[in-house]
Amino acid sequence: MTGVLVRLKLALLRNGLRRSVWQLVGLIFGVVYGLGFVAMAVIGLIAMRWLEPQLAHHVTMLVFPVITIGWVVLPMFLHGADNTVDPSRFALFGVRAGELLPGLLLGGLIGVPGICTMLVSFALVASWSTGVLPVLAAIVTAATGSVLCVLWSRTVLTWLSALLRRRRVRDIAVVAFLVLVLGGSLALQSITRMGEVSQDHLLGMLTTAGTVLGWTPFGWVWGLPGAVALGAWPEAAVRLLLTIVLVVGLSLLWRARLAIELTSPLDTADSGGTMRADSWTDRLLPATPAGAIAARGFRYWRRDPRYQVSGVALVLLPVFMVAVVLINDGGLGLAVWAPVLVAMLGGSSMAADVAYDNSAFALHLLSGVSGRDDRWGRALTYLWILVPMVLVMTLAAAAVSRDWTHVPASLAISAVLVLAGIGAGAVVGVHLPGKVAEPGASAFAASSSGNLQSMLGMGLVWLLTGMVSLPTLALVIGSLVGPVWLGWIALPVGVGTGLAALTIGVRTGGRRLDHRAPELLATVSTVG
């Protein structure tokens, strides 16, 4: 069974590459990008060989427990990001948990995260190549630590699977992940600005943190090479014993929960409630195909975690931008321009809207929806969301920064970016929709091929939007270096050129969609 599961995982990866050239090209870019980080980590671990053994010991116990914790925490936030060889798919085959466990363990090491973890872990051999016994201890640590990363991840994720299948829990996890990432970035920037903290004091803080992490279950195995190199044999014996107990304990816990999952009825995710046909969106929108598409899109933004990720990110990005400026002593002068970032990113996201439909886009083809109605309906959804959002953010930023002078200029550039971005996305999205997470999967589960398509499509949308925005941008710059009243002239110019670009983009995109709707359906519904 172990060999079958490993071959199945490899077959899934291989077939995904054969299915699409984009998948192969995206994987190459992803591997090159990942290997760059791995190479830097390996070089740092090799250079650690010439550090004092005590310092190298603390660095090891600080870095590698964090990697292990990442294996535990990230799957909870990114539940469904890697659902290949999902154990729940074997529930109808009468397979026992003990037969599945070794194959699932090895399958967890097959992939970019597992391979990168093993490469970095075995670089510890070079870090502790100061004697035969430290080298042997480093080899044991690298192998056992890599296995423990997967064991921790699978055990925690399996025990929390019933909870994580609930839609509302996944929504909260997505928001928490974004807040954690942005908050962590701000914390790192704050630390770098702590000029009054001496290097000795900072080194002492890191040493204390490494000692604490090294004696948690996440760091027991990683402190073994340092203990052997320092001749702390009682510590090494305790760490080895605790590691053996941890491996056995996690394996038993994983196997117990896996047995329950394989013999319990499938627990489908909750739907999160019912939708009323007479909602206020239906009453406000026209009873046309475009109005129906707009109302459905608005519901998606309220209920679909994948859209909610974009919405939360758009709200947090201006706050993050202002916080970064404040951390770097830039003041609140740039706060009024922060919503421009929301306008640029929000409008351009129109290009990937069909990709969120996945195979459900076939309903448009079967019902005979015209390309023009499809484009206008989706454009109305984005206008409903982005226009009030940008307007409220701009006024709030002006109130916080007490800078009302540049509000017209900020609204002008935001208006043209939103309108022209939606228009450009209406055209580009027909040809380069990208590939987003499948419905019901993690909001971060897009494939490498989709990421590459999305980057190309986004770049083309920004290029077209930038060309349309040039007259408005020139007036805005003029209002900054010259008379302020140029910002009031830029506002109607931005709205006018944006509306023209939106109309042309929707009509052009609608004609192109009528011609290549089947090809677009095949692109967005391709698995992998």
Image (cartoon, helix red, strand yellow):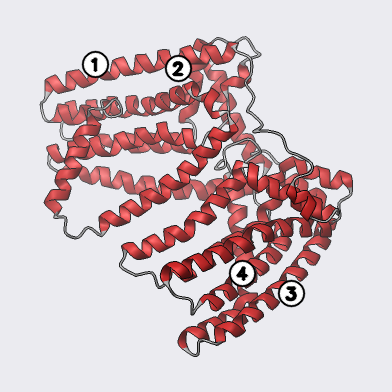
**Secondary-structure class at tag 2:** helix
Q: CA distance from mark 3 to mark 4?
A: 12 Å
Percent coordinates x, y for residue 403 in the rendering: 44, 75
Please name the residue that numbered disc 3 is placed on.
500
Say which residue label 1 marks: 241
Q: Residue at x 52, y 68 (%)?
A: 395
- Marks 3 and 4, the one that precedes in the sequence: 4
Residue 516 visible at all? no
- Name the residue that disc number 2 marks: 254
**Where 44 sits versus 491, above or below?**
above
Q: CA distance from mark 1 to mark 3?
A: 71 Å
How crowded pointer 1 is (Cα within 10 Å; few <14, some 14-19, many 20+) is rated as few
Q: Image point 43% across, 73% down: which residue?
A: 402
Q: Nearer the viewer, residue 296 or 371?
A: 296
In this rendering, the label closer to the viewer, 2 or 3: 3
Amino acid carrying label 3: it is Ala
Q: Earlier in the sequence, mark 1 or mark 3?
A: 1
Q: Nearer the viewer, residue 141 or 294?
A: 294
> Residue 145, how many percent across, how many down?
33, 27
Q: Of the residues tagged 1 and 3, which is closer to the observer? A: 3
Q: 134 or 144: which is nearer to us?
A: 144
Q: Is residue 43 left or right of residue 300?
A: left
- Disc ID at residue 423: none
Query: Type of residue at label 1?
Result: Leu
Contact between marks 4 and 1 (CB within 8 A): the answer is no
Looking at the rendered structure, the secondary structure element under dot 3 is helix
Q: Which residue is mark 4?
A: 417
- Sequence-wise, the earlier of marks 1 and 2 is 1
Say which label, 4 or 2, has the lower sequence index. Answer: 2
Check disc 3: other Cα within 10 Å, few if <14, some if 14-19, many if 20+: some
Residue at image point 44% right, 59% down: 319
